[in-house]
Structure formats: C-alpha cells, structure tokens
C-alpha cells in the first residue's frame, strides 16, 4: 500500500492567521491554484481510492488533486481525519502581521502541544491522536487496500497526528514544523510496517 497524505490548500482564514480547526472554511483562490498544481504533478500517480476529511477545504483539495479522475476514483469522507477542534478558540486571530503568536493557548499548542489544554467544546492532542490512530489502524490492516495507492486529504495537525504512526516520536509531535499547505507525505505500508518515503513534498 502506498499512501499520499496531503494537507489542504490555503484558505482565507490561513491568510488572516485565524484559528481554523473544525470550522468549515473553503479554499481561497490561492488554495485552489496550489491544489490544482499539486494535482498536475500527481496526475500519473495511479490512485485507487481517496479518503478525505469532510471539511470543505480538504474535500476540495482532494477533488482538485485528483483532477480529471475525480469522478471515477471513490472519495470517502471520514471525520476521524478532520482537523483538531479548537472549540471556543476558533475564529480568533492568533498571529500578527510579522508571524508572532498572539494567543497564549496557541503558543502552547505549537511549542509544547502535549501541554495544550482542551478548549471548551474542543479537543487536545490526545484526542486527535486517538481518532487518527483508529483510522490508520483500520486502513493499513484492510486486506482490500493491501496493494492500493491511496490519497488521504487532511489538515496540518491531523496530518502530523496520522504520521505519528510512522514517526513514533511523540516528544516531537510537529516533527519540526506544521506541514505546508498542499504538501504531500508519501508512506509505504507492508505487513503493517510503515516507511516514510517522502516528507512534506511541495509540487508547486
């Protein structure tokens, strides 16, 4: 099984430095362009199936990445790979124009994610790790996917949570950084063992 794990394209809230999480924000024109360019680069990848977060920005990125094949390759929405829910923090601005983090909670989220407290009506790192792990285990042990090439469209934190099943390095959750918009991580899985082939690959 080969997995192509893509983070969604840019949204208006990404550009405005707003906490996004489970808020259902669509792609901005720039996000559409990046997803299309990524799709062009992946046009010869023989995808068999796609799993996507149900949030618009991820599902649209999946559709654009699949390009002309979007109508013929199954796209299955799965809430387990949806972005972390920031609860009451969603919609708040967390960075200034220079990129400095304004919010104390978000400072902790990026610098020491294990200490990030679950916001009201939201999730913490343990929550997103648990649900993405359930998705991961189900898919990598599904005999019908054993020899398939799979596209997974998700989000920054959810991608890093999924990839913890490959990294197995909980101390370094972010693995250096948040994956860039429309970056692709390629993972080969054989007999339950996962190997990272390409990390945060950008095709635009």
Image (cartoon, rainbow, N blue to C red):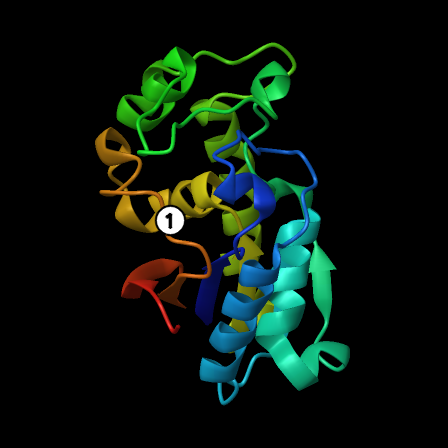
The number of numbered discs placed on residues in the rendered structure image is 1
x 61%, y 10%: residue: 120
x 64%, y 34%: residue: 22
Q: In this view, which residue lies farthest toward the bottom? A: 44
Quarter occupied by the C terminus: bottom left
Give coordinates of residue 157: x percent, y percent: 44, 39
| Residue 148 in view | no
Q: Nearer the viewer, residue 74 or 70?
A: 70
Give coordinates of residue 116: x percent, y percent: 40, 16
Q: Nearer the viewer, residue 194 or 183?
A: 183
Give coordinates of residue 172: x percent, y percent: 23, 34
Q: Nearer the viewer, residue 4 or 67?
A: 67
Give coordinates of residue 111: x percent, y percent: 27, 24
Say above or below: 188 vs 80.
below
| Residue 163 in view | yes
Q: With 204 as the anchor, is 7 left or right in this view?
A: right
x 38%, y 53%: residue: 180
Say above or below: 12 vs 59.
above
Circle 1 is placed at which residue position? 163
Question: Tag 1's secondary structure?
Answer: helix
x 57%, y 39%: residue: 13
Say above or below: 42 vs 177.
below
Decide: few, some or many residues near mark 1? Use Cα within 10 Å; few <14, some 14-19, many ≥20: many
Q: In this view, which residue lies farthest toward the right? A: 71
């Amino acid at each position: 099984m080969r997995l192509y794990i893509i983070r969604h394209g840019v949204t208006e809230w990404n550009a405005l430095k707003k906490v996004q999480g489970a808020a259902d924000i669509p792609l901005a024109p720039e996000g559409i362009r990046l997803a299309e360019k990524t799709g062009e680069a992946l046009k010869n990848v023989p995808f068999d199936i796609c799993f996507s977060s149900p949030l618009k920005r991820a599902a649209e990125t999946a559709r654009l990445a699949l390009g002309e094949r979007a109508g013929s390759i199954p796209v299955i929405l799965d809430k387990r790979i949806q972005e972390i829910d920031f609860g009451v923090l969603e919609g708040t601005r967390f960075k200034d124009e220079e990129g400095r983090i304004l919010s104390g909670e978000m400072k902790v989220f990026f610098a020491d994610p294990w200490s990030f407290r679950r916001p009201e009506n939201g999730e913490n790192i343990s929550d997103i790790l648990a649900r993405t792990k359930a998705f991961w285990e189900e898919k990598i042990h599904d005999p019908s996917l054993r020899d398939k090439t799979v596209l997974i469209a998700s989000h920054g934190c959810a991608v890093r949570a999924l990839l913890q099943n490959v990294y197995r390095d909980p101390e370094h959750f972010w693995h250096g950084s948040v994956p860039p918009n429309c970056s692709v991580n390629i993972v080969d899985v054989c007999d339950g063992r996962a190997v990272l082939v390409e990390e945060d690959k950008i095709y635009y």
